[in-house]
Amino acid sequence: MRLIAPSLLAIALLAGCAPTAAPPKTAVSASAAAPAASASPPVSTPAGAPAYSPRGMVAAANPLAVEAGLRVLRDGGSAVDAAVAVQAVLGLVEPQSSGLGGGSFLMVYDAKTGKVTAYDGREKAPAGATPQLFMGADGKPLNFATAVLSGRSTGVPGAVGMLAQAQKEHGKVAWSTLFADAEKLADDGFVVSPRLAGMINSPRVPQNTATDVIRYFTKPDGKLYQAGDVLKNPAYAATVRLLASKGADALYEGPLAEQIVARLHQGDLPSTMTLADLKAYKPRSADALCRPWKVYTVCVPNPSSSGVSLLQALQMLEHTDIASRGPSDPIAWTQLAEAERVMYADRDRYVGDPSFVKVPVEGLLDPDYVAQRAKLIGVSAGPAPTFGQPKGAPKVGADSTLEPGGTTHMVIVDPQGNVVSMTTTVESVFGSGRMVGGFFLNNQLTDFNFDPRDADGAPGANAVAGGKRPRSSMAPVIVLDKNGKFLAAVGSPGGSAILSYNLKAMVGVFDWGLTMQEAINLPNMVARGDAFSADVDRLGPDLTAALQARGVMVKVGQNETSGLHGVIVRPGGVLEGGADPRREGVAKGLQ
């Protein structure tokens, strides 16, 4: 059995609970001893330190944002209150990933009722958008970088409106108190992190040619900001002061909305967005999409999130022996890769905005269909699977959507046991590269399929339409135990790879009995169609060779930079948090 970490032991004793070396099988099943494998285990790599607390936890992509969330919790705020503060700071210090001009999916667990609610703050296309939005005058799809930098790429921002709705329903403190940290950091300045500096100075980021990006990230001496420099953003401070005093409506009506519309109408490929589009935006909320898995219940957002596909993959893997294997076994990684390929084949064909296209959720999760699809998971990689035919599947065309990974994830647990699992984004690095009010506008509409029809004329499930939400890979997860109580939450950025990252973490924790931090640290494996990608350095040469021998053709030099954050409840009610060492996030407990 795994020895308990000293910090967990100390916290457990302070909390008056008896620590246990490992979670009992009724909570999180540790895997059976893994069979001897022909390959060495993954290379050990430096990792972020796990966090423990009996009271509360914040795990997010920047320490300044984590501290903002903890302040709100210490002041009596709820998990949703803290999420507002965390998002406000992330939009300032991690603008390459998310912000006030972006969108989000938010999962909320209410400790009193045991209910999990899914909030959809996905951006919407303007009413005037047509299926030819990203088609050029020559009848061919636009170059991706050209589309991203155009006014057409931006959808009506949804994150702020969604957070306002969730905070109204789950908040405990005044909305106006939640922006103080972001305001102060914007006014006084914040230290540019190494990751942000890398994005600012990268020649591979198309947005770095945009006027607003150059202006914002160039110092008075004409040089670009570097890690360790202090960056001030008085315009952002003014915006969060406005949001604090006037509420979320200040983004959707009035001077700020007028600036958004004006900025998007500039350039050669202008948006059709109007003030009416902004004013009409409404976030969606509903019971989360929850399904049994092992002895647990796994909850994800509803489409246009791709959470349904993550549930399908988890259920398919139950038909394999992956749980009796382990992270050093090449067969286990092959099974994971093959499950992903089937998952993506179905996801890419069928998932879209349910207000515009029928998404066969029940068919995709039907036990007989899952069992049928699971037969495609072998111990070696076969031909790329095609999409299946679940019950209720509509006739839709093929998909060619591209999804960059400019996104971030947070998990928050408050002292009352309420939980937030939230994935939030501006889509690509610095979104569209256009700024208003000190924040970047998203390029979320490039998450649509550029070419609206398949070769046979059938429209794609993710084709552009006015007022439609583009399909999203964001799939924040909340797991309930056999009694319906909160057990774990996890999520990641990463574009289409989000589903693979989340799946790996779930397998690591619940199949292989790892700690949350150990599961996050595992190599990432992303398999879609004929393409395989992985953290080859983390796999190590022996395991890489063993996978290649099974047809999983990962290659030297590949990497997959997830940004996983997770929290799990251990025996005695102690919270264990983990943060991805591949990025700059931390998990920190409320003390």
Image: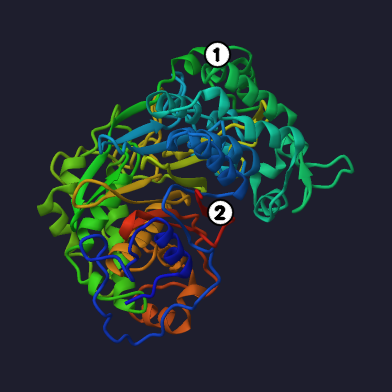
Mark with earlier residue (2, 1): 1
Residue lying at the far right of the rendered structure:
221
Label 1's element? Answer: loop
- 238 vs 548, left or right, is right
Q: To which residue does mark 1 refer?
A: 253
Q: Position of residue 485 (x, y in %)?
A: 25, 46
Residue at 63 percent of width and 31 percent of height: 180
Q: Position of residue 300 (x, y in %)?
A: 31, 43
Q: To which residue does mark 2 refer?
A: 585
Q: Closer to the camera: disc 2 or disc 1?
A: 2
Q: Position of residue 34 (x, y in %)?
A: 28, 80
Tally of numbered discs: 2
543 or 229: nearer the viewer: 229
Instruction: Say above or below: 14 vs 97.
Output: below
User: Residue 447 falls in which quadrant of the image?
Assistant: top left
Q: Amino acid at mark 2?
A: Gly
- Whole-angstrom CA distance, mark 2 to mark 1, is 34 Å
Instruction: Say above or below: 100 vs 326.
Output: above
Q: Which quarter of the figure is the N terminus placed in?
A: bottom left
- 85 vs 492, left or right, is right
Label 2's element? Answer: loop
349 or 516: nearer the viewer: 516
Q: Amino acid at mark 1?
A: Glu
Instruction: Say above or below: 52 vs 190.
Output: below
